Amino acid sequence: MICDGGILYSRCVMVGPANDIVAVEQVGGVCVVTILVRELDTANAEELSSRLLALLNEGKCFNFVLDFDTVRYMESACFGALVTFVKWLSRFDGKIALANVSENVRFLFAVTRLDKVFPIYSDVPGAMEAMRGKDQ
């Protein structure tokens, strides 16, 4: 179990196998994918891509919120994996949003102009609310 927070707020996420880099929770037709690693490197990019595509192929989710709260660093391979996933997602008329993106990672999205492709929200509830608004 991974826990963080302070006196007023705390959050715990159950983690699967030791090599699992994400935790997935389905909330009202949206898959909230919490990334559990601090650094998204090339190996993690492949694992993240595989997990996201598997969720899409299972047909249980076509709307995704990726929670980046733990992530502090991303390699370029991860941007490629996310763009590839968005291309697949568009075939299913799915939607994606990012939440809790650190300043460093947000800067990388801005520099690569991928912040125009991936809507970024300050927290998961904000991303969920925006996603529900897009469905109306």
Image: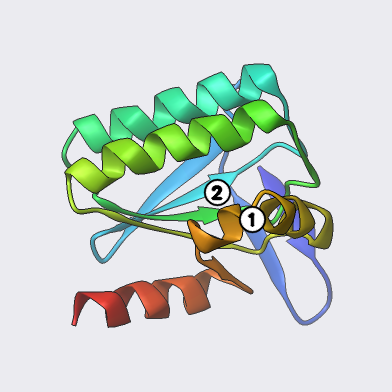
Instruction: Tell me which amino acid carries mark 2.
Output: Thr
Determine whether 5 is above or below 56 in the image.
below
* 80 lies left or right of 8: left
| Residue 16 visible in image | no
* 97 lies left or right of 67: left
User: Of callouts 2 and 1, which one flags the residue occurring earlier in the amino acid sequence?
Assistant: 1
Disc 2 marks which residue? 34
Q: Quadrant of the N terminus?
A: top right
Please tell me which residue lies in front, 41 or 6. 41
Name the disc covering residue 4, or none.
none
Tag nearer the camera, 2 or 1? 2
Q: List x then y, in percent, for residue 41.
A: 72, 25
Look at the numbered disc 1 and give the secondary structure of its residue: strand
Q: List x then y, in percent, for residue 135.
A: 21, 75
Q: List x then y, in percent, for residue 4.
A: 77, 58
- Classify residue 12 by image quadrant: bottom right
- Classify residue 17 by image quadrant: top right
